[in-house]
Image: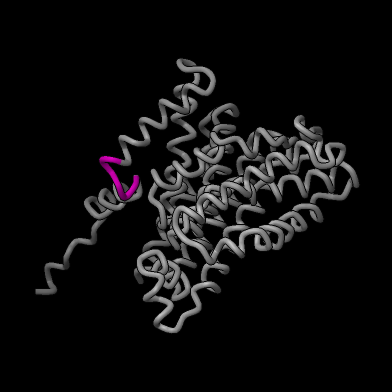
Amino acid sequence: MWLLGQLRWWLLFALGMSLLPLFISPGTLRIFIFANFLAMFAMSWDILSGRTGYISFGHPFLIGIAGYTTAMLTYHLNWPLYITIPTAVVTTMIGGTLFFLPALRIRGTYFALVTLAFMELMYHSMQVVQPKLTGGTRGLSGLPTLVSGAVPNYYLSFLVMFAIGVGLWLLIRTRLGIALSAIRMDEDAVRSSGLNTTRLKLFAFMVSAMVAGIAGALYTHYLGSISPRGIFEINFLFTILVAALLGGAGTIIGPIIGAYFLTFLLELLRPYIPGAGRYLIYGVIALVLYYYVPKGLYSLFERLRERFFRPRPDPQSD
């Protein structure tokens, strides 16, 4: 019954978001599209780092593998998208695992630094290794899109984001998801209980890579282009991390809330603070909010839900 009650909120969320195109302009819908993609990226980071406590600074590495794979296959070989996108997802899962598997045996700051090094390696490789294939510093443009127009792209991005969100939300409520959270609290205790923590972390990484692959491939074809600076820029990584942490790491719902909050905050600041300066402002705002709401915006949502929608006790039960 509790699970059905929680799913009710997901359905209400889907219903409300499905009606948005009836009331807002195409320009505002495009902001929601970027928020949907940021939510996918943040959830992908959250299922690995938020659940297990292994903080990754190299998540754009996974997004870039997917984006460049589908971009090169469509640009150079003219493969259809229904082949290139699944290929990109599988490539991300396999390629990312080959790079990250050794790093899963280290912890803390060392893991974070290794993942950051992978991202930097990918960034420079895309510029200097086979520039005719990757497009070099300019990247690849003129890529085909799945759908055209603000409304179809909004529904596509939201549908994928919603499916990923519900799937991951259900996953973290299974025994496997609980075991991942236990790793974050005390990995040695989990290992001493007989569970293989390396396999658990590898599973979390594979799920994270799959979500990053789906989101990265779709995002590339939504933009119709990809470049090293656009994917591997530090601001992009910073935005993903802040969305997950500010929304509420380890909750899956929190990164969605954080993604919408940050996306619209950036748009509100755009007319007043052009350029990269607005990232500094929203970073300060994010730090202030994180200081006063350490468990993320999701905790505020939970408090409001419990306060106003808590089931009233049955007077006849006494």
The image quadrant of residue 237 is: top right
What residue lies at 45% left-to-right and 22% top-to-bottom? 269
Q: Nearer the viewer, residue 270 or 113?
A: 113
The image quadrant of residue 44 is: bottom right
Considering the image in quadrants, where does the C terminus appear? bottom left
Please say if 21 is above or below 121.
Answer: above
Apparent side of residue 300 relative to residue 8 in the rendered image (left or right): left
| The stretch drawn in magenta includes residue 295 | yes
Q: Nearer the viewer, residue 112 or 8?
A: 112
Residue 45 in percent (x, y) is at 52, 52
Apparent side of residue 131 relative to residue 48 in the rendered image (left or right): right
Please say if 311 is above or below 81.
Answer: below
What residue lies at 70% left-to-right and 41% top-to-bottom? 220
Residue 248 in percent (x, y) is at 38, 50
Task: Name the residue at the top extreme.
Answer: 272
Q: Which residues, given as a range, are shown in magenta?
A: 291-296
What residue lies at 52% left-to-right and 30% top-to-bottom? 24
Please say if 144 is above or below 104.
Answer: above
